[in-house]
Image (cartoon, rainbow, N blue to C red):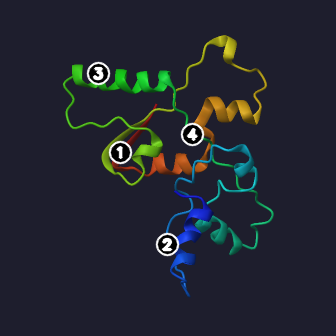
């Protein structure tokens, strides 16, 4: 999950003559907080950029920018409340994670919550892309949705 310039450092330092990229460009992308860096395309991983070059349709199908991971007090509180509620119901061996934190993990069963709640005054009738990125976070990011949908081995429940 690192930006392309960070991927190039070990290649340049070791003077590699050949590089093999292995991965899944549908998994999480680098989280870029700087608007200018995002506009320059650093939200795309080096692996994704090279995978897209192989597609003859790559110039016709723009790749959506990865939404930034949202973390604020409300979401932290929500995670805490979920953990406490599960403990009270005598659930054991459970994990409450964000999509980003769950990458690389697998569980037999996953409950994936896509529920969003905002005060009515914060809901835009005609939301802009910026509003969606700020308030819908991973729901509009196909990389994070892919990660969320591929963590369960036996069953997935989407709320």
Between 20 and 37, the one lying in front of the other is 37
| Mark earlier in primary sequence (3, 1) | 3
Crowding near the residue tagged with mark 1, few <14, some 14–19, many ≥20 C-alpha atoms within 10 Å:
few
Query: Residue visible at 79% across and 66% down?
Result: 59
Tag in front: 2 or 1: 2
Residue position for label 2: 22
Distance between the alpha carbons at the discs numbered 3 and 2 = 39 Å
Q: Looking at the image, do the residues carrying marks 3 and 2 touch, with CB atoms under 8 Å apart?
A: no
Between 132 and 6, the one lying in front of the other is 6
Tell me where residue 57 appears, x and y as whole percent.
76, 68
> Considering only vertical position in the picture, is 159 above or below 108?
above
| Mark earlier in primary sequence (3, 2) | 2
Crowding near the residue tagged with mark 2, few <14, some 14–19, many ≥20 C-alpha atoms within 10 Å:
few
| Mark earlier in primary sequence (3, 4) | 3
Tell me where residue 108 appears, x and y as whole percent.
29, 47
Query: Residue visible at 61% across and 45% down?
Result: 141
Query: Residue visible at 54% across and 84% down?
Result: 16
Q: Is residue 41 left or right of residue 74?
A: right
| Mark earlier in primary sequence (4, 1) | 4
Q: Number of marks in the image?
A: 4
Between 45 and 124, the one lying in front of the other is 45
Residue position for label 1: 155
Crowding near the residue tagged with mark 4, few <14, some 14–19, many ≥20 C-alpha atoms within 10 Å:
many
């Amino acid at each position: 999950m690192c930006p392309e310039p960070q991927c190039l450092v070990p290649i340049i330092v070791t003077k590699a003559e050949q590089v093999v990229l292995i991965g899944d460009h549908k998994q999480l992308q680098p989280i870029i907080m700087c608007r200018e860096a995002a506009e320059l395309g650093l939200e795309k991983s080096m692996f994704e950029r090279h995978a897209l070059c192989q597609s003859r349709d790559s110039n016709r199908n723009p790749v959506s920018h990865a939404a930034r991971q949202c973390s604020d007090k409300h979401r932290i509180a929500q995670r805490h409340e979920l953990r406490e509620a599960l403990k009270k119901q005598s659930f054991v061996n459970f994990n409450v994670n964000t999509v980003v934190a769950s990458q690389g993990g697998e569980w037999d069963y996953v409950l994936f919550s896509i529920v969003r709640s905002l005060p009515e005054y914060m809901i835009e009738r005609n939301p802009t892309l910026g509003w969606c990125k700020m308030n819908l976070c991973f729901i509009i990011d196909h990389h994070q949705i892919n990660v969320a949908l591929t963590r369960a081995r036996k069953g997935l429940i989407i709320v």
